[in-house]
Image (tube, rainbow, N blue to C red):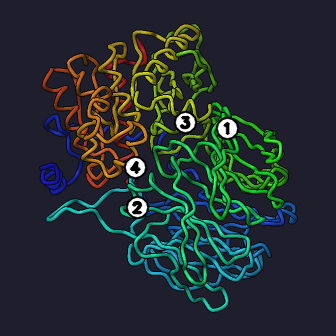
């Protein structure tokens, strides 16, 4: 029934508005338009000897209908003021910068044929040109040099070019509906001959991997069945690179990511924890003997969330990046003593490559647009100035903490721009997705920059309630079997703290969010009438029906403790639809009609109920979009409608 309805809507084309005749599109927003002009950095990698840095940089398209161009750049840190060099031709896709131990650079790029990435090797970075190695037909990712430099491994989905992942737009269902069978396999490319051979079994989907130091084995995380859904069930294996013989090492009792084989060959480590989304990593670092055995937690009860790590060459230390109460940090774990030394911590975010001595990073903060930096860790020198023309259109930002449920909770408050402390301002509370994620200090992207409401005369409050990263696994686990209850308590306590200390008009406070934040918005307006207006993007109205509609139901087991069929009451207690008669708040609802992660049926269900009970509402459906939007016109339209909704229902000036 749902597939038939959505297909009919898609045939009509354009935006669909479930409230009747489509209103005119709001005017484009100048502040948002400026974000579309910024350069983005997709990857950064420092060479093994710390002398060269490579990064992937996208430049905004001059034509709206074209994709941004992507280039690989290289900077020799010993060249002083010399400019960075472009490596190879421009592309529309590039990823996976990887350095060999002897200083060769490899990466993936579709510079030869749009949409099909190939593997390139630069033998003498800075002097030689990239050489294509092998020939791929399908989606390819995660290249990694073998320690002996003779091979590069990649993950490959043969004959399938669509980027995998639940946030991408899913194809429309038609005919006999069945799960799409996609296999992501491990392949090894011989650098000398260019020959590629697949070594992993055909019945398993590999998510990530790492070479053993002997170059004869690899460890990987993999699961049977649907790749998008079963990441949550991934187990740890090892495979012989020559024979393809596989042995099982561990079935983690948690989600796992960032698998790393120790340089001495004795141990395999990974980050484990409760993670609601593949690719958004946080937890604690665990280690298991490479031959199998007892799992050991290396960072027990740490009051932060490690997000990435690498071994030191001696295998005696681990360098890790951490989410630390809204900040980013770089720390070193000594394995013998268990002590951790934090060498750098800052109110910013970005990517890291290197160790505690020398590294390359992308740095982004509320006041600094993204750029590449490198040098002594924590004392980096700026390498790029690609975003020097970017201008901040939002106000000052402040990290704040408050007490809720006996613990400290952290969040960010963005001040109106301009700001006069003698005046009262409205405020929008923006709740992040996940729930296992967090808001860190960063220059906004064009995707969903609710911070820009600051430039419209609003405070913007972005809490990191229980369930978020940044304060340790106990805090991240704190909303298990309790969605919406304790985390809403944290949000409301934060609103109280902000209103008490800052000139916020308590009668003009709104709430907004996307994904889990969309659920939290739907939940909030069913639990309290405190908020004047709401925006629920890609939300979840009914956890019971959602279980059978979304494409990644496995993530829910860890949070609810059982499937909806085994414990429906656990899902019912957190379903906004069961409390729908309480809603008085005007609520704007939006979703993409190809969203597999938070299907549009959930938004329909909530909108229909609001309409039934006479609550002011508007529903906007975006044809062709998945959980993450890609069309710049849709992104602009979405943001403009959010601004318009809050201005109509809780205007910035009285």
Q: Earlier in the sequence, mark 3 or mark 1?
A: 1
Secondary element under disc 4, as helix, strand or loop, is loop
Tell me the element at label 3.
loop
Q: CA distance from mark 4 to mark 3?
A: 17 Å
Q: Quadrant of residue 411?
A: top right
Q: Nearer the viewer, mark 3 or mark 1?
A: 1
Q: Which residue is mark 1?
A: 300
Reading the image, the residue beneath label 2 is 227
How many residues crowd around disc 4 within 10 Å: few (fewer than 14), some, or many (20 or more)? Answer: many
The residues tagged by marks 4 and 2 sit, at their Cα atoms, a distance apart of 18 Å
| Kind of element beneath mark 2 | helix
Instruction: Judge depth for marks 2 and 3 and give the one in front.
Output: 2
List x then y, in percent, for residue 62. 49, 60
Asked if one can make out residue 389 in the rendered structure from this viewpoint, the answer is no
- Is residue 4 depicted above or below 92 in this figure? above
Tell me what residue is drawn at x 64 percent, y 71 percent.
144
Q: Which residue is mark 3?
A: 438
Distance between mark 3 and mark 1 Cα atoms:
20 Å
Q: Nearer the viewer, mark 1 or mark 4?
A: 1
Which mark is in front, 2 or 1?
Answer: 1
First in sequence: mark 4 or mark 3?
3
Give the foreground label among 4 and 3: 3
Q: Residues within 10 Å of mark 3 (few under 14, many from 20)?
A: many
Identify the secondary structure beneath mark 1.
loop
Residue with the mark numbered 4: 628
Give the alpha-carbon distance from disc 2 to disc 3, as whole Å. 25 Å
Q: Are marks 3 and 1 in contact (CB under 8 Å)?
A: no
Mark nearer the viewer, 4 or 2: 2
Residue at the outermost front position: 293
Asked whether disc 2 touches disc 1, contact meaning CB atoms under 8 Å apart, the reply is no
Q: CA distance from mark 2 to mark 1?
A: 30 Å
Label 2 or label 1, whichever comes before in sequence order: 2
């Amino acid at each position: 029934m749902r597939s038939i309805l959505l297909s009919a809507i898609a045939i009509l084309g354009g935006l669909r508005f479930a409230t009747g005749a489509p209103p005119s599109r709001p005017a484009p927003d100048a502040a948002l338009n400026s974000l579309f002009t910024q350069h983005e950095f997709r990857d950064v990698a420092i060479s093994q000897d710390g002398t060269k840095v490579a990064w992937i940089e996208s430049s905004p398209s001059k034509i709206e209908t074209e994709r941004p161009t992507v280039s690989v750049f290289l900077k020799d840190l010993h060249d002083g003021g010399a400019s960075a060099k472009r490596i190879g031709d421009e592309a529309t896709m590039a990823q996976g910068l990887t350095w060999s131990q002897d200083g060769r650079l490899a990466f993936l790029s579709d510079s030869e044929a749009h949409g099909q990435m190939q593997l390139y090797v630069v033998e003498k970075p800075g002097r030689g040109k990239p050489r294509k190695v092998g020939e791929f037909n399908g989606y390819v990712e995660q290249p990694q040099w073998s320690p002996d430099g003779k091979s590069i491994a990649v993950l490959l989905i043969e004959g399938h070019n669509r980027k995998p992942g639940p946030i991408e737009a899913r194809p429309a269902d038609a005919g006999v509906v069945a799960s799409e069978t996609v296999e992501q396999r491990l392949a090894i490319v011989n650098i000398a001959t260019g020959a590629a051979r697949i070594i992993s079994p055909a019945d398993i989907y590999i998510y990530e991997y790492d070479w053993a130091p002997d170059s004869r084995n690899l460890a990987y995380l993999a699961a049977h069945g649907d790749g998008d859904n079963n990441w949550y069930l991934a187990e740890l294996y090892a495979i012989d690179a020559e024979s393809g013989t596989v042995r099982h090492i561990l079935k983690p009792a948690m989600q796992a990511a960032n698998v790393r084989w120790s340089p001495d060959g004795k141990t395999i480590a990974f980050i484990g924890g409760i993670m609601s989304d593949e690719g958004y990593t946080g937890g604690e670092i665990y280690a298991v003997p490479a031959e199998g055995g007892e799992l050991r937690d290396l960072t027990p009860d740490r009051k932060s969330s490690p997000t990435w790590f690498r071994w030191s060459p001696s295998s005696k230390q681990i360098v890790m990046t951490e989410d630390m109460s809204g900040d980013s940090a770089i720390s070193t774990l000594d394995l013998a003593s268990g002590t951790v030394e934090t060498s750098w911590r800052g109110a910013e975010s970005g990517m890291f490559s290197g160790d505690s001595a020398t590294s390359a990073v992308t740095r982004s903060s509320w006041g600094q647009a993204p750029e590449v930096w490198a040098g002594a860790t924590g004392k980096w020198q700026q390498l790029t100035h690609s975003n020097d023309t970017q201008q901040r259109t939002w106000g000052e930002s402040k990290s704040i903490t408050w007490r809720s449920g006996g613990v400290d909770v952290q969040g960010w408050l963005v001040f109106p721009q301009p700001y006069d402390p003698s005046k009262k301002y409205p405020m929008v509370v923006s709740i992040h997705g996940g729930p296992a994620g967090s808001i860190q200090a960063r220059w906004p992207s064009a995707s969903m920059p609710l911070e820009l409401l600051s430039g419209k005369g609003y405070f913007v409050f972005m809490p990191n309630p229980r369930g978020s990263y940044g304060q340790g696994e106990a805090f991240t686990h704190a909303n298990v079997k309790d969605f919406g209850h304790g985390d809403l308590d944290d949000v409301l306590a934060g609103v109280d703290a902000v209103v008490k200390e800052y000139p916020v008009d308590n009668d003009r406070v709104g709430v907004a969010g996307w994904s889990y934040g969309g659920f939290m918005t739907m939940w909030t307006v069913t639990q309290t009438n405190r908020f004047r207006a709401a925006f629920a993007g890609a939300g979840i109205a009914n956890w019971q029906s959602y279980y059978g509609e979304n494409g990644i139901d496995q993530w829910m087991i860890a949070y609810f403790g059982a499937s909806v069929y085994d414990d429906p009451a656990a899902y019912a207690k957190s379903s906004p639809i069961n409390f729908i008669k309480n809603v008085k708040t005007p609520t704007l609802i939006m979703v993409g009609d190809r969203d597999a992660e938070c299907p549009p049926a959930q938004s329909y269900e909530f909108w229909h109920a609001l309409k039934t009970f006479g609550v002011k509402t508007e529903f906007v459906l975006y044809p062709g979009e998945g959980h993450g939007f890609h069309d710049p016109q849709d992104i602009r339209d979405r943001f403009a409608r959010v601004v318009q909704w809050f201005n109509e229902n809780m205007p910035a000036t009285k």
